Image (tube, grey):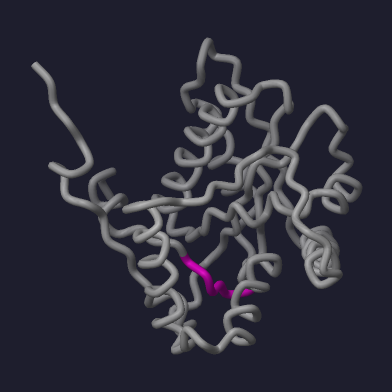
Amino acid sequence: MTLKNLLENRYSVRGFKPDPVDKELLKSIFSQAQMSPSNCNVQPWEPLVVSGEMRDKVSNAMLKSVMSGNPPNPKFDWVTRYQDEHRQRQFGSANALYSAMNIKREDKQARNMAMLRNWQFFDAPHAVFFTMETYMGIMGAVDVGIYAQTLNLLFAENGIQSCMQGALGQFPDEVEKLLDIPDSKGILFGMSFGYEDPDHPANAARTDRVELGEAVKFFS
């Protein structure tokens, strides 16, 4: 499959089968992802992959934090209050997801339950937390984003589906304890991955992209 095909056909999957991905295949994919470009070749990414028993421990710990009512306390200031067309696109994305799941706008309980699935990894058998040294700042975050996209496309090339999740960086305290993350490092975001459950209604959601003329300006 060409890169063009991958980009045209991939989408965020929010319903997975329990079947784990072969460990050797995962090692091969993560090895290839190491070829991602980075500023001055510093390679700031430090991905932490959870599967099996550890996956369950991490999920339960995050759910406990969320359900406690405590506010999010991410290591990085990633909260953005979207404005104008970006706000409209955010609404459009949420509408596409909740419509696919037949959840009405006024059904707050159902929306909250759908939101909680983030910290259950949408039932995926694996998740990866993208971490880096906190001093790296915006330049490190850019490099980690490039790495995550490379990994995402390598997954797609191998028939593995995924969902990027800022939510996985919101409640880091217990995750840091379980995964022995030192104070000098932090979780930027995460990604759940595995094999898609085609019968899950969330996987019918699709989003669009703005036209080239609106997104890109060419100068000569």
Q: In the image, residue 30 lies at what x, y percent?
A: 58, 39
Residue in front for this viewpoint, 131 or 36: 131
Q: Range of the magenta residues?
A: 13-18
Residue 195 shown left or right of residue 71 in the figure: left
Q: In the image, residue 9 lies at what x, y percent?
A: 29, 59
177 magenta-colored: no
Query: Quarter of the image holding residue 68?
Result: bottom right
Query: Quarter of the image holding residue 209?
Result: bottom left
Question: Which residue is pictured at 38% across the width and 77% down the height?
Answer: 204
Question: Which residue is pictured at 87% across the width and 33% down the height?
Answer: 182
Residue in front for this viewpoint, 21 or 147: 147
Residue 202 shown left or right of residue 20 in the figure: left
**The furthest residue to the top:** 40
Q: In the image, residue 196 lies at what x, y percent?
A: 49, 70
Q: Is residue 24 above or below residue 105?
A: above
Total labels: the figure holds 0
Q: Is residue 164 above or below residue 130?
A: below
Q: Is residue 101 above or below residue 15?
A: below
Q: In the image, residue 167 lies at what x, y percent?
A: 64, 57
**The furthest residue to the left:** 220
